[in-house]
Image (spheres, rainbow, N blue to C red):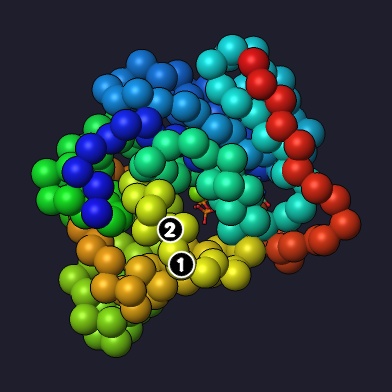
């Protein structure tokens, strides 16, 4: 339950997002109306992403050389100091200017998690394969865990620190997103939605299916600016 936002930690995983990350972080810095810290967890990108993040002077940059979307988010969440964490991709596909909607609803409803659903987007920009896959996973998740979510694959979520500290998250890749929902449902933590829109990628490529997660041989390090 989260009735007050003392500090929100925005955690953004990036891997070669040089053409996308600046717009995402500057929009968040400008629009987010709550006390905040912005943490970018970069997978040691080679396209200039790290340098762009450093140059902003308002982001904390963590280099996480181990591969995996879930690995990156877990590293960022560990570093986060906020009582609320917002996770969002740094790839320009989420409408980050809607960020306050998640927090407003979280406070109004005393929720444990608020997800930004892209399923009511009138522009319907999501690819057909992603749309159908998402619908199937969401149907089974809602059925088995008695929930009413419409977009289980959204990576734009506000999460209570207290709640996430009480669940065990083992997945290091994209399954992390679904695992989190299952763990929250099992603990009967409340999960609500707000509407957002989906934007197709303008720069870079999808990474989620390409890398296997978790190499245990290197550790993350952080750089403050
Ligand atoms: N640090 C880190 N970030 C990653 C890794 N894999 C993916 N990401 C980031 O996690 C976010 C989600 O990955 P995407 O490649 O966009 O996956 P997707 O959303 O299914 O694909 P698109 O439809 O192309 O957006 C993006 O911001 C990526 O840059 C990784 O191994 N390490
Ligand atoms: Mg993406």
Q: Quadrant of the N terminus?
A: bottom left
Left or right side of 110 for 126: right
- Residue under circle 1? 167
Residue 32 locus on image (x, y percent)? 32, 25
SS at mark 1 in the image: loop
- Residue under circle 2? 164
Q: Residues within 10 Å of mark 1 (few under 14, many from 20)?
A: some
SS at mark 2 in the image: helix
Q: Quadrant of the C terminus?
A: top right
Q: Which mark is residue 71?
A: none
Q: Quadrant of residue 181?
A: bottom left
Return the residue found at the far bottom: 144
Residue 195 appears in view: no
Front residue of 131 and 60: 60
Please tell me which residue is depicted at 25% across the width and 62% down the height of the picture. 191
The answer to whether marks 2 and 1 mark residues whose Cβ atoms lie closer than 8 Å is yes
Please tell me which residue is depicted at 18% across the width and 71% down the height of the picture. 148
Left or right side of 44 for 54: left
């Amino acid at each position: 339950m989260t009735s007050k936002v003392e500090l929100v930690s925005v955690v953004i995983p990036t891997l070669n997002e040089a053409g996308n990350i600046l717009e995402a972080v500057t929009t968040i810095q400008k629009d987010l109306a709550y006390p905040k810290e912005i943490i970018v967890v970069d997978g040691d990108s080679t396209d200039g992403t790290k340098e762009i993040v450093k140059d902003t002077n308002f982001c904390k940059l963590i280099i996480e050389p181990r591969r995996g979307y879930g690995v990156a988010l877990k590293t960022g969440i560990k570093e986060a100091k906020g009582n609320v964490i917002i996770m969002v991709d740094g790839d320009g596909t989420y409408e980050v200017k809607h960020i306050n909607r998640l927090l407003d609803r979280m406070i109004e409803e005393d929720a444990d998690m608020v997800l930004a659903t892209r399923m009511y987007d009138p522009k319907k920009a999501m690819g057909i394969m992603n749309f159908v896959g998402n619908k199937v996973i969401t149907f089974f998740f809602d059925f088995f865990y008695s929930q009413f979510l419409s977009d289980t694959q959204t990576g734009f979520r506000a999460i209570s620190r207290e709640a996430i500290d009480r669940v065990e998250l083992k997945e290091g890749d994209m399954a992390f997103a679904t695992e989190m929902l299952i763990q929250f449902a099992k603990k009967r933590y409340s999960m609500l939605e707000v509407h957002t829109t989906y934007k197709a990628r303008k720069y870079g490529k999808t990474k989620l299916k390409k890398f296997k997660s978790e190499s245990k041989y290197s550790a993350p390090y952080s750089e403050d600016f």
